[in-house]
């Protein structure tokens, strides 16, 4: 059968019932009053028996990212083999921050990151600044009253679901979103913290620089 469609601009289209059409969908813009976001972690990365949750929150808008205990153990084994175990925890922390930010649909202008990995601020900054290059980063003690602390804690105790859940299985089959251990030629701090290793386009570590 042939059908006639009239568009909003009053044009007529003769088409079949099975012919596909694309519909333009306007993305909903979220209202925003706060641009200062805090970052907190529940169960540090090196606690290998528990899932790790990282939350990014302004109190108005929040997002959380989780990596399972099993995924951490498998990934750490790879990093140990590559001789980079010391940088494993802060690097995963930075990756989870980026993953949480990628779930926010608002402007992030300032990040106040809980000081959980002292001595690795430069590494974390390089990774996060690639995701939000215009944001200012501050490393502080955010405290238990932080909205990020509450967001992470609620996921940890089961009262909320993480916005994104990272497992070794889901990463292993998808090169673009896989966490990779660094090769032995890329173990310097500069190479390891290269901001090009992380991006918001559904991948964490660049597969050309990181290997299984």
Image (cartoon, rainbow, N blue to C red):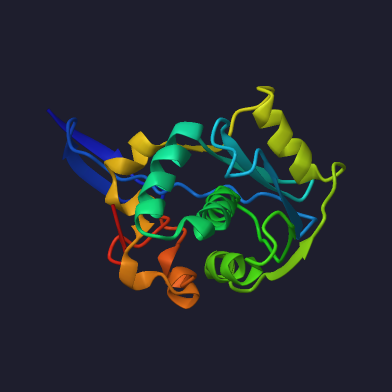
Quarter of the image for residue 118 reads bottom right
Residue at image position (69%, 23%) is 159
Closest to the observer: 25 or 10? 25
Quarter of the image for residue 196 reads bottom left
The location of residue 131, given as percent across then percent down, is 54, 64
Q: Residue furthest top?
A: 158
Closest to the observer: 145 or 102? 145
Residue at image position (30%, 42%) is 172
The location of residue 15, given as percent across then percent down, is 17, 39
Closest to the observer: 9 or 43? 43
The location of residue 207, given as percent across then percent down, is 30, 60
Please determine whether, in this image, residue 155 is positioned above or below residue 121. Answer: above
Please determine whether, in this image, residue 209 is positioned above or below residue 38. Answer: below
Q: Evaluate whether residue 53 shows in this view.
A: yes
The location of residue 108, given as percent across then percent down, is 67, 61
Q: Residue furthest right?
A: 145
Q: Is residue 156 left or right of residue 65?
A: right
Q: Residue furthest bottom?
A: 190
Q: Evaluate whether residue 9 shows in this view.
A: no
Q: Is residue 36 left or right of residue 197?
A: right
Q: Is residue 107 left or right of residue 103?
A: right
């Amino acid at each position: 059968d042939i059908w006639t469609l009239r568009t909003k601009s009053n044009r007529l289209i003769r088409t079949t019932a099975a012919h596909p059409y694309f519909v333009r969908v306007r993305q909903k813009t979220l209202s925003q009053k706060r641009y200062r976001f805090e970052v907190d972690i529940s169960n540090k990365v090196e606690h290998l028996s528990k899932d790790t949750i990282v939350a990014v929150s302004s109190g108005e808008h929040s997002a959380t990212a989780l990596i399972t205990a099993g995924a951490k153990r498998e990934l750490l084994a790879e990093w140990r083999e590559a001789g980079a175990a010391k940088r494993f925890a802060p690097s995963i922390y930075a990756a989870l921050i980026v993953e949480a930010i990628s779930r926010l649909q608002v402007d992030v202008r300032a990040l106040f990151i809980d000081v959980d990995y002292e001595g690795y601020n430069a590494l974390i900054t390089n990774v996060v600044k690639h995701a939000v290059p215009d944001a200012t980063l501050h490393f502080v003690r955010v405290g238990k009253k932080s909205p990020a602390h509450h967001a992470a804690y609620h996921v940890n105790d089961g009262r909320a679901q993480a916005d994104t859940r990272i497992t070794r299985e889901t990463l292993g089959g998808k090169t673009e979103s896989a966490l990779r251990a660094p090769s032995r030629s890329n173990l310097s701090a500069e190479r390891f913290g290269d901001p090009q290793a992380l991006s918001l386009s559904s991948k964490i570590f660049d597969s050309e620089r990181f290997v299984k």
